[in-house]
Image (cartoon, rainbow, N blue to C red):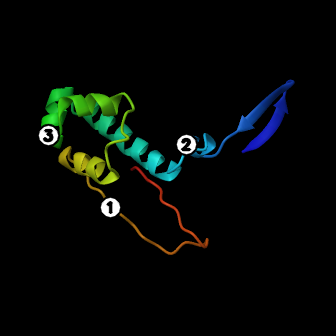
Amino acid sequence: MKNKIINGVEVITGSNNVYADLGLENAEKLKIKTGLIIKIIKAMHTQELTQDQAAKRMGISQPKVSEMMRGNFTNVSERKLMDCLTKLGYDIEIKVRPSKALVGNMMLVVC
């Protein structure tokens, strides 16, 4: 994170991951889950699905859909979110490549 003074106000520029900026554990996984849920919500809107209709298509309960839409996704795995997206008509592609760094990272690229 970088700090700048603009018009007498300290402005902190964060990274591309708000969870990392907040110092949360598993920040990369949280960012990936958030991206998947955003895509699920967009799919629901595009397909004009109610929470109940989406729940039935995804094979989960309506209260679980409601929780996801409110940002409560701690008890849902990345795998389950990917399954939900495939059931809503999306393809998932996982790409593995060597990292330039000693330790690699995970990221979500949404098309």
Nearest to the eye among marks 2 and 3: give it.
2
Q: Is residue 33 above or below residue 69?
A: below
Q: Which residue is mark 2?
A: 19
- Which of the 4 quarters of the picture holds residue 43? top left
Residue at screen point 20% across, 47% down: 89
Q: Position of residue 9 (x, y in %)?
A: 82, 25
Nearest to the eye among marks 2 and 1: give it.
2
Residue 7 can be seen in this image: yes
User: Which residue is outermost to the right?
Assistant: 8
Q: Which residue is mark 3?
A: 57
- Considering only order in the chain, which callout, 1 or 3, is on the residue closer to the N terminus? 3
Residue 91 as seen in the image, left or right of residue 71: left
Residue 49 can be seen in this image: no
Residue at screen point 40% across, 46% down: 33
Residue at screen point 18% across, 39% down: 60
- Which of the 4 quarters of the picture holds residue 48? top left
In the picture, the disc for residue 107 is: none
For badge 2, the amino acid type reads Tyr
For badge 1, the amino acid type reads Glu
Q: Is residue 101 above or below residue 7?
A: below
- Quarter of the picture containing the N terminus is top right
Q: Secondary structure at mark 3?
A: helix
For badge 3, the amino acid type reads Arg
Q: Which residue is mark 1?
A: 93
Disc 3 to disc 1, how far (Cα)?
20 Å
